[in-house]
Image (spheres, helix red, strand yellow):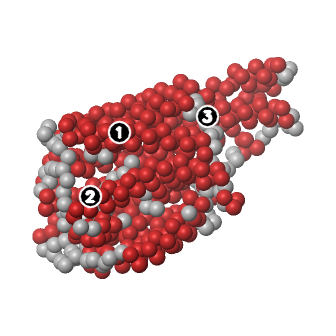
Amino acid sequence: MDLLDVTIVNVAAPSIQNDLRAEYSQLEWIIAAYVLAFAAVLVTGGRLGDIYGRKRVFLVGIAGFTVASAACGLSGDASMLIGARFAQGAMAALMVPQTLAIIRTTFPKSERAKAVAIYSGVGGSAAAVGLSLGGLLVEWNLFDLSWRPIFLVNIPIGIIGFVAAAIVMKDSRSPAPPRLDFVGMALAIGAIMLLVYPLTEGRRLDWPAWTFAMIAAAALTFAAFVAYERRRARTAGSPLIDLDLFRSRPFAVGLGSWLLFWIGLGGFFLVWTLYMQAGLGWSPMRAGLTAVLFAVGAGIGAGTSVSVLAPRFGRRVLILGGLVNAAGFGYYGWLAGHYGADATSPQMIAPLLLTGIGFGMIVAPTIDLLLGQVPASEAGAASGLLNTGQQLGTALGVALVGVVFFTQLDHDSARGVEAVTPGIRAELVTAGVPAPAQDQIIARFRACVQDRSAQLDPAAVPESCRTTSGPDNQLNQLLSDAGAEANAVNFAHTFRHTLGWGIGLLLLVALGFLALPRDARLEEHDFDIDEIGPEPVSV
C-alpha cells in the first residue's frame, strides 16, 4: 500500500485534475503532500515503535493509512484530497519503519534473509506496477468512480492487513529506546515547508516578494536545525539526525548525489504522465501500460547492478547508471521534439528501457555502497537518513519541475500555433474563406492557445476561447483539432526542455559519485533492531 500510493497517483493525475477542477499547483501538492509527510515523520515513527512497541505503532499506522485512503477516495475537492494525502503519508511513516524490525524479531537469523528478500520483492513490485495499475483502474471506471478506486482499493487490503497483524505479529520494543526530538522535528518540517510552499505556489501568485522571503527563511531555519541538533547531541542525546555521519566526506557527497537524483526523477514521473495524457491525449490505460516499459528497464538495471556489476566495479556502476539515465532522457527528449504530436508507444520503447536501466543501476546498489562509508555502528542511522533523503528529494523534484515545466509551457504557446497555422489556412482557403476573415480566425485561435497555455486552472475555458466564428460546425471542428495538435506540440517541446534540466542534474549525480572510494563495494550490515532504517529502496 505504501509504495503503490507513491507512484499510482501520477498516472491518475490528469483525471483527478479534470474531476476536481484542480489548479496545476494543487496537482503538485496532491503528489508531493504524501512524500513530504512521509519524510517528516519517518524517523520519529521508527522511534515511536522503539518506545511504545512496534506492533502497536504498526497497527495505528495501518489503521490510519486505511482511513486516510478512504478520505482520499471520497474527497470532494482538491483541498480535501491534499489534506488526506498529508495524513496518508504521516500514517505510512508510522507503519513502514516497524516492518523490518518486526521481521528481525520474528525470524531466526537463518531465515531472515529470505524474509527480507520477500519483503523487498513485494515492495519493488508495488512501486513498479503503480503507474500501470493506476491507468487500468482509471480506465475501468469501477462503479463509475473514475480515479477514486486508486485510493479505495486500500480499504479492504488495510482491513485484512490490520486483522492479520493483530493476530499474527509479535510485539517488540527497544530495551533502551531513544528519546523523541520534537524540537528537531518541528525545525526540520518548518525548513522543508518554507522551501516547498513558495516553489509550488509562486507561479500561481506571480512570485510576490514574500515567496522569496520564505525561501530565505527556509535557509535560516535549516541553519537553526543544524545548530540545535549539534547541541542536542552534546546534551540530551538522541538527535533527530546524527550529524557525525557527515564527517565521512564520501558519505556526505554521496548523500547529496542521492538527493539530487531523486529531485531529478521525482519530477520526471509527473511531467511524463502529463505529456502523455494532457499533451498527446492518450488514455490513462495507454499511458499506464506504456509505463511498464520503464519498470522492465528498471528491473533489468537493478538486477544486473546488484548481482553482477556492483560487486565487481563498485562506484563505477553508479556513475554509469547516471550517464545511462541521462542518455535515456536525451533520447526521449529528441523523440518528443522530432515526432511532436505524432509520438507513439512503440517509439517510446527504447528511451523508456534506457531510462529505466539507468534508474535501476543507481537505486538498487546506492544505499549499500554508501553505508560502506560509515562505521557499522552508524549504519542504521545512515540508512534512515538516506531513505528520508529519497522522500524529500521526490517532494522537491515535484515542486521544482512545476516551476520549470509550467513556466516553459506558457512560453511555448506560440510554437504550437506556428506549427498548425499553415494547415488551418489551407483548409480555410479550400472552404473559400476570404483572406481578411482568415486572419481574424487565426488571430482568435492564437489568442485562445496562448491563454490556455497560461491558465493556472486547466479546466477553466479562457474568454478568448469562448468566441467562435458562428454556427459553422465544420470550422469549429477544424479549430478544435488544430488546438489539440498545437497543445501536443507545446507539451512535447516543454517535455524536452524539462528533460534537459534532468540531464544536467543526472550529470551532477554521476560527478558526485566520483567522491566514493575507488574500492567501494556493497556492504551488508546486520542492524541493531533499534537502528532499523525505514525500508529498502525499491524500483
Q: Earlier in the sequence, mark 2 or mark 1?
A: 2
Report whether residue 433 is seen.
Answer: yes
Question: Residue tagged by mark 1?
Answer: 301
Residue for point 16% across, 65% down: 230
* Residue 161: image location, x then y, percent: 46, 70
- Between 137 and 210, which is closer to the camera in this rendering? 137
Left-right relation of 311 to 188: left
**Circle 2 sits on which residue?**
113
Q: At 43% from the left edge and 64% from the top edge, which residue is drawn? A: 89
Q: CA distance from mark 3 to mark 1?
A: 31 Å
Mark 3 — residue? 488
Task: Report helix, strand or loop for mark 2.
Answer: helix
145 shown above or below 66 = above
Direction from residue 463 to residue 294 in the image, left or right:
left
Which numbered mark, 3 or 1, is in the foreground of this view?
1
What amino acid type should be assigned to the residue bearing mark 1? Gly
In this rendered view, identify the residue nearer to me: 121 or 454. Answer: 121
Q: Which of the two discs, 3 and 2, labels the residue nearer the N terminus?
A: 2
Q: Count residues near mark 3 (Cα–Cα under 10 Å), then give few for <14, some for 14-19, many for 20+.
A: many
- Disc 2 from disc 1: Cα separation: 22 Å
Which residue is pictured at 69% across the width and 38% down the height?
448
Amino acid under label 2?
A: Ala
Disc 3 to disc 2: CB gap under 8 Å: no
The residue mark sitting in front, 2 or 1, is 2
Residue at image point 77% right, 31% down: 478
